[in-house]
Amino acid sequence: MRVVFLDIDGVLFTRRSQQAYDRALGSGALESDDERVRAFEPRAVESLHVLHEAIPFAVVVSSTWRLRLSIQHLRALLGPMGHWVVDTTGPERATRAQEVSEWLAGRSAPRNLPAVVESFVILDDIDDGLSLRFPGRFVRCDPDRGFGDPGQIKQARGILRAPLV
């Protein structure tokens, strides 16, 4: 199984997304907070689809959104990408790197997933120990633009193709 550890803020929901969302919410154009997904950066969403078409993967949500939303709610918010979501990392820890480490070690992984993770990439806008703990497995996203730079897609694709040693 190939895995993308997905942060949402700064990856799919950018600063520009937040501004658009706030304007729409203030104008009454949105009916609920759940419609935040409408503000996801279109290029970031498309880029995730392009990556998935090239190399199918499962998503483990590592975003802090997992702390306030159930996995079913996250799947619904992610729309067509929701069926890629297989899990979330566990409880909040001191660093995102620790959360990912624990999931990979199986302490947070559900029993119904394949035991073997063939490869993984972490998409996040904040390093939080990720580049040190997982050298070569972290793609840092610009919080203003999210995931979608052609170099980021190429980097993520290369990482997912590289088996764990």
Image (cartoon, helix red, strand yellow):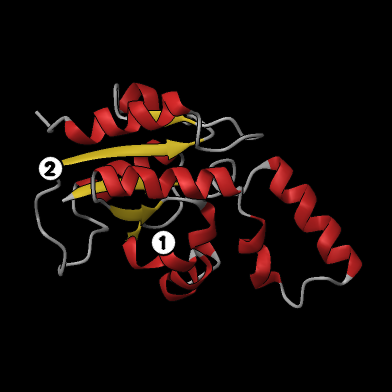
Give me the residue at 9% from left, 28% from top: 165
Compared with residue 7, is residue 84 higher up or lower down, i.e. above or below? below
Query: Which mark, residue 142?
Result: none
Q: Where residue 144 sits: x, y (%)?
A: 66, 34
Viewer-proximal residue among 73 and 162: 162
Disc nearest the viewer among 2 and 1? 1
Is residue 55 toward the left or the right of residue 138 in the image? left
Q: Amino acid at mark 1?
A: Met
Viewer-proximal residue among 42 and 140: 42
Compared with residue 45, is residue 152 higher up or lower down, i.e. above or below? above
Check disc 1: other Cα within 10 Å, few if <14, some if 14-19, many if 20+.
Answer: some
Residue 7 seen in this snapshot: no
The residue that label 1 is drawn on is 81
Secondary structure under tag 1 reads: helix
Q: Where residue 65 sits: x, y (%)?
A: 54, 58
Check disc 2: other Cα within 10 Å, few if <14, some if 14-19, many if 20+.
Answer: some
Residue sticking out furthest to the right: 27
Compared with residue 112, is residue 129 higher up or lower down, i.e. above or below? above
Give me the residue at 27% from left, 50% from top: 103
Secondary structure under tag 2 reads: loop
Q: Where residue 58 sits: x, y (%)?
A: 27, 55
Is residue 22 toward the left or the right of residue 107 in the image? right
Q: Where residue 99 sits: x, y (%)?
A: 36, 46
Residue 115 seen in this snapshot: yes
3D distance between C-alphas at marks 2 and 1: 21 Å
**Would you say the residues marked 2 and 1 are in contact, meaning their CB atoms lie under 8 Å apart?**
no
Q: How many marks are shown on the rendered structure?
A: 2
Is residue 10 toward the left or the right of residue 60 in the image? right
The residue that label 2 is drawn on is 118
